[in-house]
Image (cartoon, helix red, strand yellow):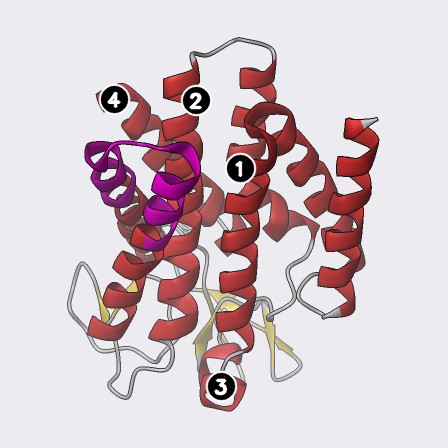
Amino acid sequence: MELIVVCFIIAIASVMGWKAKSITKDGAIAAFIVGLLIYLGFSYQGLFLLGCFFCSSSFFSKYQNKRKRIAADILEKGEQRDIIQVFANGGVPAFLGFIYSFGFISQQTALVCFCISLAAANADTWASEIGTMSKKEPRLLLTMKKVPRGTSGAVSILGTTAAIGGALFIAFISYLLFSLSLVWVVYIALFGFLGNLLDTIIGQTVQVKYKCTYCGKITEKQNHCNFKGVKISEYSFLNNDAVNFLSIILATGLGFLFS
């Protein structure tokens, strides 16, 4: 009976996210699956932590949209998260909930890795959404070259501060929900921020980008100005969703190894 009630609550939350245009219809289905698997492993506390990530990221996605128009022209996808984006950010936490529910991993390890995965996702989301509002142009992390706001692999003081805040936010909520020690809170925040750093490095090096053959702008969109863009690097092969997923896996995996 309890599971039925929980499924109903998750379904309502997913539909509300779709109605609020924070996620697409297929994204709502993915959110339901992610929420259910997290509940199976980490109960209501896990669901609440997921909700903190989703609500905060949705808020900053919609906050001051007018100031983000330049970045939106570069980015492949908009503020509505589709099924791929939901699984890219929530797939690792959901997998951890699934394997912990079957006893394949110890409670402490599963919990810490779960919190790290959400901290990494939140750090990256806050950095992306808040960083694009920076008044100064960001710089590519590895070359320090100035680039337009929204460029993958670029950093700014505002965006980096937001990433730290996003990781700390999840770490602090984890502390309240799971009665973790302050040492684990710092640990979760550090590896959460590391996830954002890895996302930035991977985004600059191997994320696929295209040059518009009409206006010459470098974007994540293969089609821009109704023209097909030219891939600017033969070694790039990952889109933004794959970069997000990989950075969360790496941050969580490193957190597991050093825990």
User: Type of residue at label 4?
Assistant: Ser
Residue 181 colored in magenta in the image: yes
Give the structural element (helix, strand or loop) at label 2. helix
Q: Quadrant of the C terminus?
A: top left
Question: Which label number is shown at residue 64?
Answer: 3
| Mark earlier in primary sequence (3, 4) | 3
103 relative position to 84: left or right: left
Residue bearing mark 2: 110
- Mark 3–mark 1 contact, CB under 8 Å? no
- Residue at 35 percent across and 54 percent down: it is 169
Q: CA distance from mark 3 to mark 1?
A: 31 Å
Give the structural element (helix, strand or loop) at label 3. loop
Residue 25, horizontal then vertical, whole percent: 80, 57
Residue 213, horizontal then vertical, whole percent: 52, 79
Magenta stretch in the rendered image: 169-190
Q: CA distance from mark 4 to mark 2?
A: 11 Å
Residue 14, horizontal then vertical, whole percent: 74, 53
Mark 1 closeness class: few <14, some 14–19, many ≥20 residues within 10 Å:
some
Q: Looking at the image, is 200 positioned above or below residue 253?
A: below
Mark 3 closeness class: few <14, some 14–19, many ≥20 residues within 10 Å:
few
- Residue at 29 percent across and 69 percent down: it is 159
User: Type of residue at label 3?
Assistant: Gln
- Mark 2–mark 3 contact, CB under 8 Å? no
Q: Is residue 209 visible?
A: yes
Residue bearing mark 4: 259
| Mark earlier in primary sequence (1, 2) | 1
Q: Looking at the image, is 237 positioned above or below residue 213?
A: above
Residue bearing mark 1: 45
- Residue at 58 percent across and 24 percent down: it is 41
